[in-house]
Amino acid sequence: MIDRGRTLVLLLAGGVGSRLNVLVQPRAKPAVPFAGVYRIIDFALSNVMNSGLGQVGVLTQYKPLSLMRHIGTGAVWDFTGRTRGVKILPPRTGFQDSDWYQGTADAVRQNIDFIRANPSRELLLLSGDHIYQMDFDDMIRCHREKAAQITIGMMVVPKSEIHQFGAGITNAEGRIVEWEEKPREAKTDLASMGIYVFDTEYLLNLLAQDREMLDFGMHLVPRAVERDRVFAYPFHGYWRDVGTIQAYWEANMDVLRDDAGISPEAWGIRPNPRPCANMADRPPVRFLRGNHAERSLISAGCVIEGTVVNSVLSPGVHVGKGAMVRDSILFDDCHIEAGARVELAILDKRIRVGQGAVVGTGDKGVVNCQHPTHLYTGITLVGKDAEVPAGASIGRNCIVSPWKKAADFPADGKVGDGETV
Amino acid sequence: MTTKLKPATLAMILAGGRVDDLNVLTYYRPKSAVPFGGFARVIDFPLSNLMHSGLERVAILSQYRSFSLINHIGSGAAWDMIGRYRGVSILPPSKGSGPSNWYLGTANAVYQNLDFIQYHSPREVLILSGDHVYKMDYRQIIDYHRAKDADLTIAFLQVPREMASRFGMADVDNEDGERGGRVLHYEEKPNLPRGDWASLTVYCFRPRILYEVLEANARDDDSFEFGRDIIPRLMHEGRRIYGYKFRGYWGYARTIEEYWQTSMDLLGDDPPIRLEEWGIRTNLEHRNIRDCQPLKVGAGAVISDSLVYNGCVIEGRVERSIIFPGVHIRPGAEVRDSVLFFNTTVGPQCRLSKVICDVNTVIGGRVEIGGSAAVQDKEATVVGWNNHIPDGTVIGAGCTLYPQLPSEQWRTHIADREVIR
């Protein structure tokens, strides 16, 4: 176990994650609910806690309210105490750096005062966007053993996907000798997970040198690889960037399977039960006579009268008599009224699907007209607080924007494949 | 200086008792800390009622195996009882300069803490039992108490006279019709009651009268119970004693059969006990149930007319049962008419019928408990905590299995109504 307080953690939680579409309209990507009771950022925060680290800064920028409420005092992750704490670091105006965060390195640079105020030997830089379990303590140990200046968490990905990542070529001792950010052609299959350990002094020097360097992967790491000791820390396990609707849906579905390699509770991932889901006010799940539930995750406070198959339900979801939910993800307090059907859909909080309405029916091949790169596999999205009127029928790859009510729907209640309300 | 923040009423919960008839369930915990409702403890009912009544200055009198209770109460934050004038104080028996002793009865427990009451100098003292399952807005009885300028106001419920021998029974007149009236006669557990109003052990006292009667009781009597000694003494003195007529659900659990029946009142399409409506809260930090992932329902699972909390994995069949966090029911197992406490595992191909199983018990494969008789024709079998029931064991109905039985105590066949200790 390393000395507590000797490693400072910075968590980048400012990204918009715009490909998550209506799910990130009311909140930042790290605050998007996941697997019923969690938020995406719980994975990074819990990994930090379980690694024995406790001095954390969370860099926010985009719609931080939901995130700030979620993190609270940090007590859930044991970030309160003499040498432990969590600070929210929003962009600030100052004498010179009076701008929004323009990139990962820029965000860190703008918080140099925080880094100096919390003296550390190493700085662990993470993203709050990923679903995984990792022991950072071991990564820091490797960093010290190799006398590295930067250590980057890296994993093998299919070569066809390498263009989305920072790619590194390593030598026999694990040192990165060549770096390409989002390469068009794959020379390697080793991809950066956006997890960095820096020697703190080294990082402060690096950031001071060239203030035009705004991004780690794009600017700082390629230069460091050329002259300094940059090592890869290999990771073998479940890791997902749930940055697209399809990836987000798949990762949720993975939790339902026993062989997918993801198990939040066994990983020691801690949700914060208080601020949003009000877990304290949720009784056990009530299964009424005549229901049918299988292959699903169902959270406390749900009432199941109808059918739930292969789905993930957050707290407080009601599935009425004769209603059916299949292959779907439902956030807190959705009400699926009697006889309604929800198939291959993601419903944000407090959606009401009226009696007999259908969400998700038709041709999966018709992509969304407005966002063809977001919705193309058949998944339909319904935004926060929307009401799908009784008897309505919503197709595949559709979007219902947040806060839409019956009057916003076409008179016949039909929303064709790929359309947006 | 007075402030409106400071509550006028001090609430005291009598939570010390062990109930012999509850047997192994109160082997290691007071009755008030017995699990109930699939996630909570019995004492959560009065605590939640107090919270919703805005009475958040609370003392808990406890002496029997208090550890589980103290753990459960924690800081009191779960019921919002933490603040400038809000809080929970646990009052165990203590030594002092005067004569001190174990609590010799409910009245003696309060008597030994008169200094605590005097320190708070409340306008009235509300004394409750921690043992009952009900929803009550205590503001109504307090309002009535104030309106009548009573010395003592007691909550009563109308019951069939044949049940009288188990309650304090009163004759209450109709001075205020449905709301309440003067207590004309009171008797503790009479065979032939003069009235049909049963005391709910909810007492609202004028503090001065409480002090006087407790002093007299301590000085003159050799029994120290509210029902048996204090109320008759006040009746004899001709004090202003009023009855507040309560008409809601009242659940009690002084025997295993009553505990089972009260648990079953949580089930059905229209259950008498409505956890969500009643706003029952528990302390999610106790046993860390806040860290649970949602309930995982497996491919072959069937769950009917049951309550199941987060942290469970259900792969078998569950009917008319209450399943607490962390229970794992393996494929092919069938659990009917049962209550399974925290972190119990039911092995493959098991058959459980009318079983109450305490925490951390591992039931091996192909175990049969409770026999095949119809549920109304048999008594519940109770399994104490931390047991490991070997594969293939057959256990009858109405059996009692003590906690933590050593492996040599197990036989392959345990007949109906046997007690294994």
Image: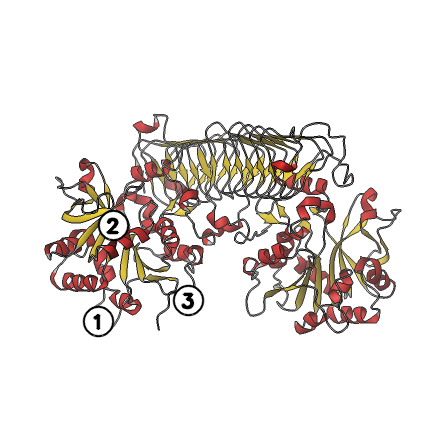
Whole-angstrom CA distance, mark 1 to mark 2, is 29 Å
Whole-angstrom CA distance, mark 3 to mark 2, is 29 Å
With respect to residue A387, does B71 lie above or below?
below
Sequence-first disc among 3 and 2? 3
Secondary structure category for the residue under label 1: loop
Local packing at callout 3 (Cα closer than 10 Å; few below 14, some 14-19, many 20+) is: few
Whole-angstrom CA distance, mark 1 to mark 3, is 31 Å
Q: Is residue A128 left or right of residue B172?
A: right
Q: Residue B119 appears in which quarter of the rendering?
A: bottom left
Query: In the image, what residue type sits under mark 3?
Result: Arg
Q: Are marks 1 and 2 on the same chain?
A: yes
* Residue tagged 3: B84
Q: Are marks 3 and 2 on the same chain?
A: yes
Secondary structure category for the residue under label 3: loop
Q: Is residue B91 left or right of residue B352?
A: left
Residue A189 visible somewhere in the drawing: no
Q: Which dot marks residue A115?
A: none
The residue located at (74%, 68%) in the rendering is: A110
Local packing at callout 1 (Cα closer than 10 Å; few below 14, some 14-19, many 20+) is: few
* Residue tagged 2: B201
Q: Residue B392 appears in which quarter of the rendering?
A: top left
The residue located at (50%, 49%) in the rendering is: A279
Question: What quarter of the picture does the N terminus of chain A occupy?
Answer: bottom right
* Residue tagged 1: B98
Q: Is residue B106 left or right of residue A224?
A: left
x, y percentage for residue B230?
A: 17, 56
Q: Chain of mark 3?
A: B
